[in-house]
Amino acid sequence: MNNDNELLTASLKVAVEHCLARATVLYPLPTNWRASITISCDLRGRAAGKVEVVRHRQQLQSARLRLNLEAARIDWRQTVDETIPHEVAHLVVMSLPRQFDQQPHGHDWQQVCRALGGQGAVRHQLPLARARQPRLWHYRDSHGVGHHLTSVRHHRLQRGQRYQVLASGAWLDASGLVGPVACNTSAFNNP
Ligand SMILES: [Zn+2]
């Protein structure tokens, strides 16, 4: 990674921290909320940002907020003023009690996004090139532990194959499917 990327990454992380801190002031989030979130700037392709989450019994276990460095390079202000509040708003809504509207870009998401400084826009206008991004699927194994699987494994399981998790001996099969990882619409542009 060159110096330019390092500087951009560090600055983006500061901006995300700022937004997360604001969220914790505004909303009754769990005390370990910040600790459950990691930030990375490794997103490629047309999405400016996205969140990937692991849930257990409807509760958010951990989350990754991913940002696209190229998007930040093209338009820093849009990334800070729109993409970051957009993605943090997803994390907030997913972490609030279930009476909140859990639709990916529903009423409550809009409110939170605006409260965090965003406009509540669902798509961006940045000229980003499309990149092939492997889709991941969230499965729960026979011990109730969550796993992120590639589409190849997902399709094999749905055709009836089973996998054993070597570390625990638990089994994965088609019935363990929870759904696609993340809010796919959270790509902030790329439905
Ligand atoms: Zn979104």
Image (tube, rainbow, N blue to C red):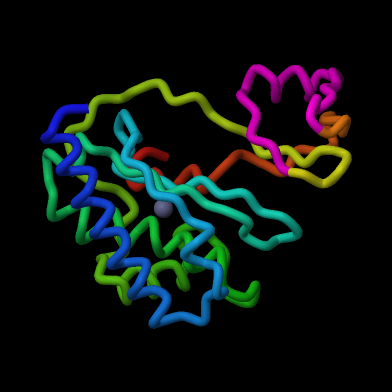
The N terminus lies in quadrant: top left
Residue drawn where x is 32% and y is 30% of the image: 44
In the image, residue 154 sits, relative to residue 70, either above or below, namely above
Give the number of marks: 0
Magenta-colored stretch includes residue 160: yes
Would residue 151 be found to the left or right of residue 25 on screen? right
Magenta-colored stretch includes residue 100: no
Q: Where is residue 95 in the image (x, y as percent from the top left)?
A: 56, 67
Would residue 55 be found to the left or right of residue 16 on screen? right
Q: Position of residue 83 (x, y in %)?
A: 28, 53
> Image quarter for residue 116?
bottom left
The residues colored magenta run: 146-167
Q: Where is residue 173 in the image (x, y as percent from the top left)?
A: 84, 29
Residue drawn where x is 53% and y is 29% of the image: 135
> Image quarter for residue 84?
bottom left
In the image, residue 137 sits, relative to residue 158, either above or below, namely below
In the image, residue 189 sits, relative to residue 110, either above or below, namely above
Residue drawn where x is 20% and y is 39% of the image: 71
Residue drawn where x is 55% and y is 75% of the image: 31
Residue sitting nearer the eye, 56 or 131: 56
The C terminus lies in quadrant: top left
Would residue 145 be found to the left or right of residue 118 on screen? right
Q: Position of residue 103 (x, y in %)?
A: 54, 61
